[in-house]
Image (tube, rainbow, N blue to C red):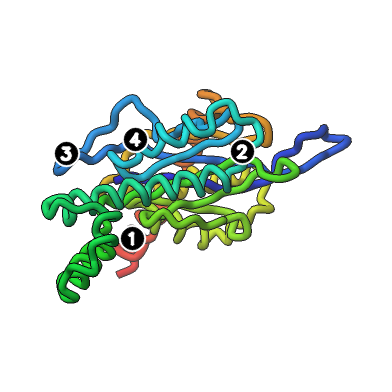
Amino acid sequence: MTVCIAVLCQWNYGTRDNPAPAPVAIVVSDRMITAGDVQYEPQQTKHANITPKILLVIAGDSLHSQAIRKTAAHFKGSMTATPEDVATFYGRTIQALKLREAEDLYLAPLGLNSDSFLAQQKDMAPHFISLLTEQMQAYRGEEVDALVIGPREQDVVSIYGVDTKGMVTCHDDVGFAAIGNGAWHVKSRLMQFGYANSNVFSTALVISYAAKKVSELAPGVGTNTDIKIVFRDHVEEIRPDVGNKLHSLILELERKPTNLARSASTGCTNTW
């Protein structure tokens, strides 16, 4: 699995003398891919630019590839699509792909598909209809989640989540969202910080990166980190020098509790 994080914060689109704060989103993810019992981190991000303004990040594997291709093709050249539009289309695509998998698993061996199953129910025994219906409805398939980030009306940047059932939710009021194996760790740390979408960019950047580092405790979360910024008119990758400085800062902060614990332990030992 993986971890993908999106947080909203405030960016000054104006100048120091004439500030014009408005939301941007910081998107942080690892690169870990799990295939059966094998895990590896390729030189490939988990981000997909659906339009020049809208970014999609994923947690999961094969179904996403098909859904991303269909979604990218549908919105190709669009300059008016919103993140809600993309999330809704993506969710329905995931639903359609999972329905097809369920058909292949439960209906195809009987020479049926969804349409023929519904059309021929008058000739089927009630318990047989009930069994197939329960199997189709219970099918979950691969666990897949996604986040869609981009500007909506008045160029306000928003975060939408798509869960494994294809259901869409908006995370603007909470101000952050996380998916993947490390999501619990991320959400817990952000809540500990009392995170809010009113945080300024620099604060949000440090907090979101720190939350990602904590999530590396979860199985299946990689150490490589990609960071992108979703502005109201484009998506931009963080500069390498900023990323390196951020990494050094977090390492320094991580050492302080360890050193404090060692000092306290030494002091207690000497006292006793």
Mark 1: which secondary structure?
A: helix
Taking depth in this image into account, of 140 and 222 the one nearest to the observer is 140
Mark nearer the viewer, 1 or 2: 2
Mark nearer the viewer, 4 or 3: 4
Say the numbered circle drawn on residue 65. 4
Q: Residue furthest bottom?
A: 126
- In the rendered image, residue 6, in percent from the top left (x then y), is placed at 52, 46
Q: Is residue 201 left or right of residue 264?
A: right
- In the rendered image, residue 209, in percent from the top left (x then y), is placed at 48, 43
- In the rendered image, residue 156, in percent from the top left (x then y), is placed at 70, 45
Above or below residue 133? Residue 32 is above
Q: Amino acid at mark 4?
A: Ser
Mark 4: which secondary structure?
A: helix
Mark 3: which secondary structure?
A: strand
Taking depth in this image into account, of 110 and 254 the one nearest to the observer is 110
Q: Which residue is mark 3?
A: 38
